[in-house]
Image (cartoon, rainbow, N blue to C red):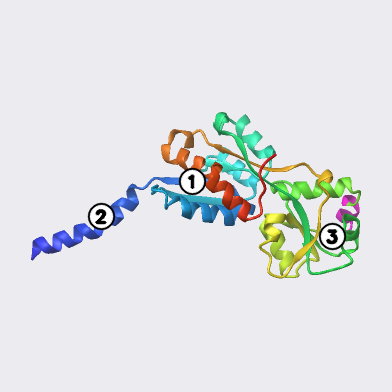
Amino acid sequence: MRMLVAIMAASLLLPLASLQAAEAIRISVPASMTDAIKELSAQFGTTGHHAAIMPNYGPSGTLAKQIVEGAPADLFISANQKWMDYLREEKRIEPATEKILAANTLVFVGMNNPAVIKMADIVRLKRIAIGSPKSVPAGEYAVQAMEKAGIYQQLEEGQKLVIAKDVRQSLTYADRGETDGAFVYKTDALMATQAVILFAVDPTLYSPVTYPIALTVDGAKSDEVKALYDFLTGPEGRKVFRKYGFSAAK
């Protein structure tokens, strides 16, 4: 009887031991890629790899600073080149692994409003959400566009800009009607339940939206991390990114 109990106990411990033995892969990912990365992480687990993927979603600037301050990360994706350059300068990524993963575009969303069809029209709105330009690339792109369109100073002085922690929060504000509109990526706009795309921001008003990816110095030492990197940058990854509205990098 005691032997039977021991065998049963050992069999129960085997799954736990396997889980504990699985390598943890920590990835830092911009909020705008949340849905795509969730799906890809699940797919990666069906390819014979048993690593536990632990994503950290947020503004690219915040994620990059966390890595420099010592936060564990094996793979980093940025929503603009600026923060990847920052990590390269800080010698936190493996330069040979850096490449452009995907591209995106900036749009303006809000409740259906036929009076808002171009940049000049938003000056009549009361509250406009943007991601914090200090850490959120979507916010930086939005400020670029407003400055080139000649309306940024007017909106700022009128205290019409509502600063969000990331692009997804900007979308939430507009989707709930808490603001009259928001600057977000096209991929985020597709997740809205109430808000609609009022207009696509003229691409000549802001820098190209690209998503560079790279392994960190620590991540480059792991075969499992390299396998995930290859999966994300390979045909499976491109297919899922297209599904969520991202375009191929030019």
Residue at image position (88%, 57%) is 118
What is the magenta range?
152-159
Spatial separation of the CA atoms under disc 1 and disc 3: 38 Å
* In the image, residue 41 lies in the stretch drawn in magenta: no
Q: Is residue 43 above or below residue 4?
A: above
Residue under pointer 3: 160
Residue at image position (46%, 40%) is 227
For numbered disc 2, what is the local secondary structure? Answer: helix
Magenta stretch prevailing secondary structure: helix
- Count every numbered label the image shows and give the total: 3
- Is residue 74 visible in the rendered image? The answer is no
Q: 67 or 60, which lies in front?
A: 60
Residue under pointer 1: 26
- Is residue 81 visible in the rendered image? The answer is yes
Specify the quadrant of the image occupied by residue 25: top left
Which amino acid type is shown beneath numbered disc 3? Answer: Lys
